[in-house]
Image (tube, rainbow, N blue to C red):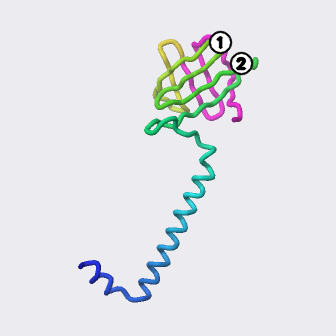
Amino acid sequence: MRSLAFGQVFEMSNIAKGQNIYRKVSTLVILAALVQVMLAPLWPATARAGEEPQVSLQFECRDGIRFRVRYVGDSAVITTSAGEFVLTARRSSFGRSYASSSAAFIQDDERAALNGLPGGPFRRCRLLPP
């Protein structure tokens, strides 16, 4: 009942303004959905419902040595020529920082440092394009 009384108070010009705003909001929602669909291939998909997206990056270090990092939740799974190693997130004043009892990995934009894992040396590492 209250909505009818409220609707009766509106003048035709106010209703027209409301419809115009509705059209604008609808257009923005549709545009946002289209952008999301267009960018979806660039964003990693989730493996299963409820899991966080996995981001996989490859780095190349001095002397051509490469390793891959897959971010899963608060862990970094690092794959080197010697195997796969899981490091957990640590507080950092810059970039991403992960560590285990024997290894440490830091990524700051396109640069990375990896210490303590077999398969190196991992010096002067740079992010490779996808």
Q: Residue furthest left?
A: 1
Q: Which mark is residue 119?
A: 1
2 or 1: tag closer to the N-terminus: 2
Vertical order, 29 against 47 (above or below):
below
111 magenta-colored: yes
What SS does tag 1 mark?
Answer: loop
Which of these two is toward me, 35 or 74?
Answer: 35
Q: Position of residue 128 (x, y in %)?
A: 70, 31
Identify the image quadrant of the N terminus. Answer: bottom left
- Give left or right: position of 90 versus 130: left
Q: Position of residue 42 (x, y in %)?
A: 63, 44
Residue drawn at (65%, 21%) of the image: 67
What SS does tag 2 mark?
Answer: loop
Q: Position of residue 102 (x, y in %)?
A: 51, 12
Vertical order, 53 against 29 (above or below):
above
At label 2, the amino acid type is Ile
Identify the residue position indicated by label 2 in the image: 65
Q: Position of residue 119 (x, y in %)?
A: 65, 12
- Quarter of the figure with residue 50: top left
At label 1, the amino acid type is Gly
* Marks 2 & 1, CB-CB < 8 Å contact: yes
Vertical order, 26 against 36 (above or below):
below
- Badge 1 crowding class, 10 Å Cα cut-off, few under 14, some 14 to 19, many 20 or more, is some
Which of these two is toward me, 53 or 62?
Answer: 53
The span picked out in magenta is 104-130
